[in-house]
Image: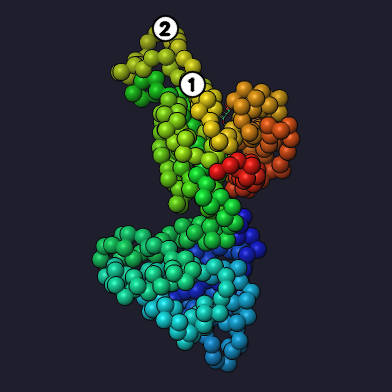
């Protein structure tokens, strides 16, 4: 769920490139995220995809031109005043050139000239066109005027060439747009986030783990990045893609996670520890695969270090937030962890509830503050939980001298 888009008025500008078909999926994601989207197509975009496709998906008539029997000559002004953000995807070299030169000769370019809200330009074209110095100069002029330009992806193009110029995936464009719409209250802060399970090896083919997928920690990293933080995500094994703009360091075991976090902790302003770290690991690692025998098998386990406690010993100014995965007596157990690990806040979740905790996209949490304040939040998406946690971290950071 991309809650930041809920109710937002977005203009999606589509220009005439082969990647125009990807704008259909982009529109679908924006609408699914709750945005109200007005699509503006240039004349050449209509050669690639029909307006009817965009009309059906957006639920709104598609805006096609400045003139004509159905056109409102002041539409560019009214649309520009109403929107929260504009995204042009794909943006051709022609459209980019016109915008850089201040030309407004169709509805889309006049609309962008009149707009005062965030504008995201997503160039897509052949690699040699994209690398042409005049296109690069035009993009630089747009950046200097405050427009956001999303770098195209590398890969094979429709013309068979290989290089930079492919329109980024629609989900990545939505993420970038969400970042433009988010408050930037974490600008200048470094956040360290842990996520996912750990794998504790028993032999070359077996390990002890838990049911964490990384969803909660990845949501924290993604939302913190949207809000302007520099984020380092230390992730145990997870199938999730790295959030856009986040530095991700993959680890397997609790010991590896501890080592990476210890190294990064001194450079961080706040630590958000959502990883489900295994408290134990096999006492010894069998170099060969353990064979099936007739007798029962015993596995000796040894303690893993408590990573939060070891980081607490190095703490200078850092805000520290832990998570507590509980199945019973949730608040009391979380309170003990808050105190023992000397945290500023702990996020307690009931991992026995079907819509909370491991693997699902929602979570119901109680926030326990060191000050004694306890806040029970309703069932929310993990993105919303992450935002709520970050709101509290922003308040805590405001009290820390930089
Ligand atoms: O990844 P998902 O599928 O989205 O699931 C999310 C989650 C349930 C994993 C997440 O919301 C969560 O609760 N994470 C913490 C899980 C956990 O390990 O809880 P704990 O109560 O065992 O540990 C308390 C705190 O100490 C945690 O911040 C943990 O990271 C930390 N810890 C635990 C053990 C250890 N050896 N070192 C630690 O630092």
Give the residue at x 38% y 14%. 284
Image: 123 above or below 327 = below
Where is mark 1, residue-wise? 305
In the image, residue 43 lies at what x, y percent? 45, 83
Q: Is residue 347 left or right of residue 303?
A: right
Query: To which quarter of the image does residue 123 belong?
Result: bottom left
Image: 170 above or below 349 = below
**Measured Cα–Cα span from mark 2 to mark 1:** 32 Å
Where is mark 2, residue-wise? 295
Numbered tag placed on residue 323 in the rendering: none
In the image, residue 23 lies at what x, y percent? 47, 68
Give the residue at x 47% y 87%. 105
Give the residue at x 58% y 37%. 319
Query: To which quarter of the image does residue 297 belong?
Result: top left
Quadrant hosting ligand 1: top right
In the image, residue 15 lies at what x, y percent? 44, 76
User: Front-most of 24 and 310?
Assistant: 310
Q: Is residue 253 left or right of residue 307?
A: left
Q: Is residue 173 left or right of residue 3?
A: left
Q: Residues within 10 Å of mark 2 (few under 14, many from 20)?
A: few
In the image, residue 84 lies at what x, y percent? 60, 68
User: Front-most of 256 and 369?
Assistant: 369
Among all residues in the image, which is located at the extreme front? Answer: 401
């Amino acid at each position: 769920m991309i809650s930041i888009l809920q109710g937002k008025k977005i203009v999606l500008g589509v220009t005439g490139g082969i990647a125009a078909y990807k704008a259909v999926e982009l529109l679908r994601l924006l609408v699914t995220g709750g945005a109200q989207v007005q699509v503006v197509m240039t004349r050449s975009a209509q050669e690639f995809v029909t307006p009817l496709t965009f009309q059906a998906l957006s639920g709104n008539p598609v805006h096609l031109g400045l003139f004509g029997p159905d056109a409102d000559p002041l539409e560019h002004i009214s649309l520009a005043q109403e929107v929260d953000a504009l995204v042009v995807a794909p943006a051709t070299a022609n459209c980019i050139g016109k915008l850089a030169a201040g030309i407004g000769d169709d509805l889309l370019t006049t609309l962008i000239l009149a707009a005062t809200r965030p504008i995201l330009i997503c160039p897509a074209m052949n690699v040699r066109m994209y690398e042409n110095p005049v296109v690069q100069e035009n993009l630089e002029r747009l950046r200097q005027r405050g427009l956001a330009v999303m770098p195209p992806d590398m890969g094979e193009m429709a013309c068979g060439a290989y290089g930079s110029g492919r329109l980024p995936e629609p989900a990545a464009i939505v993420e970038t747009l969400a970042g433009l719409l988010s408050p930037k209250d974490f600008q200048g802060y470094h956040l360290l986030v842990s996520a996912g399970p750990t794998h504790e090896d028993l032999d070359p083919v077996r390990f002890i783990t838990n049911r964490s997928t990384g969803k909660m920690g990845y949501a924290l990293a993604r939302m913190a990045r949207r809000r302007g933080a520099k984020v380092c995500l230390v992730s145990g094994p997870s199938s999730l893609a790295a959030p856009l703009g986040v530095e991700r360091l993959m680890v397997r075991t609790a010991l590896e996670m501890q080592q990476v976090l210890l190294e990064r902790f001194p450079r961080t302003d706040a630590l958000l520890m959502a990883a489900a770290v295994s408290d134990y690991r096999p006492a010894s690692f069998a170099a060969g695969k353990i064979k099936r025998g007739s007798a029962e098998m015993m596995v000796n386990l040894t303690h893993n270090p408590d990573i939060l406690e070891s980081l607490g010993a190095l703490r200078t100014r850092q805000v520290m937030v832990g998570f507590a995965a509980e199945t019973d007596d949730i608040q009391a157990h979380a309170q003990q962890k808050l105190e023992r690990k000397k945290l500023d806040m702990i996020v307690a979740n009931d991992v026995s509830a079907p819509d909370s905790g491991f693997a699902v996209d929602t979570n119901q949490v109680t926030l326990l503050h060191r000050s004694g304040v306890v806040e029970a939040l309703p069932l929310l998406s993990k993105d919303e939980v992450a935002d709520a946690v970050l709101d509290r971290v922003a308040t805590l950071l405001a009290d820390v001298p930089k």
